[in-house]
Image (spheres, grey):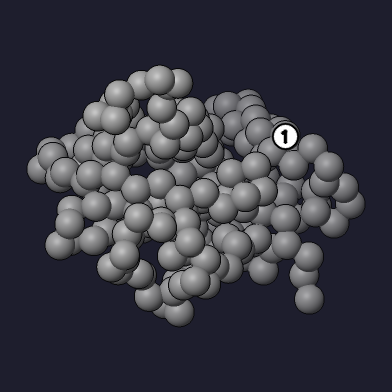
Amino acid sequence: MCETFIANHQFNAIKKHAENVLNAVRTASDRKVIESVKSSAEAEVAAMFPLATGERLKLLGEIVNVQTAEDYAKFTRALEPYLTEFPRVTKEQIVKLFPKNKKLKLPDLAAIDYRYITYLSWLDVASNKLFIVYPLDGKLIGVEGRYTPMNKKNYCFICRKYDELALFSAVSKKRPPNSSPDYYKAVGNYLCASGHDCNANMTDTTALESFIRSVLA
C-alpha cells in the first residue's frame, strides 16, 4: 500500500504545472523555451515537498516527460494512490462543531471522496447558510455563515478561479471585553458558488486559513 503524501490542493497545483508543460510542448517552437518550462515545473513541484526523497522525487519528476494528453493522464493517475484524504469526520463530530444549530442538516458523508477535498462544505438551502469544516492547525474547525448567490462571475477568494460566486458572510466567534450583547463583527468574502468546483481548483490554503482565523479572532 502506498504511503500518501500529496494533499488535494497540492495535486491540483501539480496538474496545473503539468498542463503548462503540455501546452509548452504543443505550442512553443523554441526548444529552450520548452526546457525552461519543464525545469520550472519540476522545481516548483519539488519545492512543494521539501522532505521528499528517492521514489517520491522520481514520481514527481516524471512531470518533465509529459508530451501528450495521454502522458498527462498517465502522470496524474500515477499520483492518485499517493493522495492524502481529508480527515474522516462523523455526523457526531460535525454536530459538535455547530452546537447552536439544533436542526443541523448534514451532507451525505458516504458520498464524499475525501481524496479530492481540501475543505468540507455544504449548503442548507432552507436557511441559506453555508457550513465549512477545515482542519486548522491539526484541529477540525467549523465555520458557518450567510450564503448569498451573486449571479455573476468573478474571482473566488479561496481558489482564485473565475467562476460563479456567492457572498459568504460569517460572524466572528469572539467579542471584545465589555462589549454590548448586540455586538457582532461579520467577516465576508466571495467564493465559488460550488464547493465541489472550488475544491477542484484550489492550489493553496493560505486564503482559506486566513479567513477562518479572522472569523475565530
User: Quick one: label 1, few (<14), some, or many (20+) residues within 10 Å?
Assistant: few
Percent x, y of residue 47:
72, 34
| Residue at the image point whose x is 80% and y is 54% from the top | 56
| Residue 198: x %, y % from top left | 37, 49
Element marked by disc 1: helix
Figure quadrant of residue 33: top right
Which residue is rendered at x = 35% and y = 69% of the image? 106
- Observer-nearest residue: 155 or 188? 188
Q: Is residue 21 visible?
A: no
Residue 125 coordinates in the image, percent (x, y): 17, 61
Out of 53 and 71, give the one closest to the viewer: 53
Measured from the top left, where is residue 86 in percent x and y?
Answer: 57, 60
Q: Nearer the viewer, residue 60 or 147?
A: 147
Q: Nearer the viewer, residue 43 or 93?
A: 93
Tag 1 residue? 47
Residue at 44%, 31% (x, y): give it.
174
Tell me: residue 115, above or below residue 40: below
Image quadrant where one finds the N terminus: bottom right
Q: Is residue 118 visible?
A: yes
| Residue 89 shown left or right of residue 45 in the figure | left
Q: Is residue 118 above or below residue 107?
A: above
> With 155 as the anchor, is 8 left or right in this view?
right
- Count up the numbered dots: 1
Query: Could you tell whether 32 is left or right of 60 in the image?
Result: left
Residue closest to the far left: 151
Q: Can you name the residue that lies furthest to the right here?
A: 54
The amino acid marked with disc number 1 is Ala
User: Which residue is drawn at the image coordinates 42% and 77% (left, top)?
Assistant: 111
